[in-house]
Image: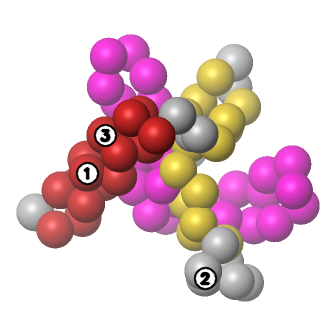
Amino acid sequence: MFERESVLTLSDGNEYVVVDKYIDDANTYVYLVDMNKHDNVLFGKLENDEIVEITDPDELEKVIKRVNDNLHN
């Protein structure tokens, strides 16, 4: 399993650093930033040992708010 500050290579071939990770309702959520292109960010959740990008606007809003709270508290 990975933790904050871990480096992951995703299926797009890019290396991402785990900026934040948390578990909510038995789901693991992550905020990732591309190590080489810092404006390439990804909010995702772990499904079957694979990180899947969150596309649902309501879920994405919830995750962004939680990540923001985690990083600023």
Q: Which mark is residue 40?
A: none
Sequence order check, earlier mark of 2 and 3 = 2
Residue type, numbered disc 1: Lys
Say which residue label 3 marks: 62
- Classify residue 40 as left or right of residue 14: left
Give the mark nearest the N terminus, 1 or 2: 2
Residue 15 in sight from this viewpoint = yes
Q: Nearer the viewer, mark 2 or mark 3?
A: 3
Asked if marks 3 and 1 touch (Cβ < 8 Å), the reply is: yes
Residue at the (31%, 25%) spot, across then down: 24
Q: Position of residue 32 (x, y in %)?
A: 55, 60
Colour scheme of this structure image? secondary structure
From the image, tell me which residue sits under label 2: 38
Can residue 25 be found in the magenta stretch? yes
Element at label 3: helix
- Is 16 inside the magenta-drawn segment? yes
- From the viewer's perspective, is residue 64 above or below residue 1? below
Indicate the position of residue 57 as horizontal and vertical percent values.
46, 40
Question: Which residue occupies the foreground of this view, 69 or 3?
Answer: 69
Task: Name the element at disc 2.
Answer: loop
- In the rendered image, which quarter contains the N terminus? top right
- Structural crowding at the residue carrying mark 2, measured as other residues with C-alpha within 10 Å and reported as few (<14), some (14–19) or many (≥20): few
Location of the C terminus (image quadrant): bottom left
Q: Amino acid at mark 2?
A: His
Residue at image x 69%, y 26%?
Answer: 49
**Quarter of the view holding residue 26:** top left
